[in-house]
Amino acid sequence: MKIKPFKTSDVSSIALNILLYGHAGSGKTTQIGKMYDRYGKGLVLSGEGGLTSISDKEIDYLPFYSFDHPVDKKVHPNGYSFMDIMGYIRSPEFAEQGYKWIAVDSITELSRRAFMEAQAENPDKNNNFKPYQIYTQKLDPLIGDLRDLPMHTLVTALAAEETDDNGQTHFYPMLHQKSKQKKYAGDFDLVCGMVTKTAEVDGKVSLKRYLICDQVHGWHGKNRDPHRRIKAVETVSDVTELVERLRSPITKGIAA
């Protein structure tokens, strides 16, 4: 077998992983529509059913109602477990569909279902730590699987608030078990907190959205951009603009 190395500078062909988190109504699901507008055909793995904001677009989606437990088809005749859908994504049938990206809406709901099922699987109800072990065994490999997909992956999450000993409020992606909130962020190329602010101009109230892509005002964004093409606080309303900046070739003269 002949092996040909890739070039790290050739990022235009690299699939990126994006995590968007924010409070309810901050516009996370709307960004799924932006993925469709720029990249075309994609698939949404929906656990919240809140797709009204992108109902004006013809985007494929599959609803999940469990992590890996069987779904009651009498209650949800068209529903799947998340792992059922992941099995489909790994199949030749999926590869033939020509999808350019997938979105998970949301990992907050997915982690909640995973922990509920871990509790149900716990053989020793007196062992309060066992459900967390089962939960970790479920979720840790899945995050790696999502990261390694050969296409852009957008994952949404609600924001969890935490106050430290100095009274500073921090905002992290909401996942069951606090240690996961920080750990899983490391698997993404771009982590953005979505913040909305209202402003009144000439008697009219307008809504402004910001993407926080670094450690700012208690939000814990991050980006893998040594060339500083991504600002700590971005005023763009389209996350795919940031994706394209990260994918754009580096020209000479840009400081590392």
Image (spheres, rainbow, N blue to C red):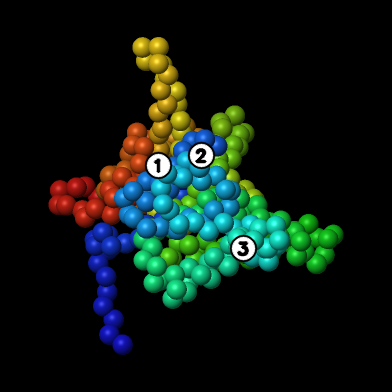
Return the disc, 3 or 2, that comes first in the chain's sequence: 2
Q: Residue type at mark 1?
A: Cys
Residue 213 is marked as 1
> Disc 2 marks which residue?
22
Dot 2 falls on a residue whose secondary structure is strand
Q: Are marks 1 and 3 in contact (CB under 8 Å)?
A: no
Q: Residue at x 45, y 44 (%)?
A: 54
Q: Secondary structure at mark 1?
A: loop
Can residue 167 be seen? yes
Q: Is residue 252 left or right of residue 89?
A: left
Q: What is the distance, in whole Å, between disc 1 and disc 3 at their CAs? A: 32 Å
The circle drawn on residue 102 is none
Mark 3 belongs to which amino acid?
Answer: Ser
Q: CA distance from mark 3 to mark 2?
A: 25 Å
Read off the residue under disc 3: 81
Q: Is residue 197 left or right of residue 165?
A: left
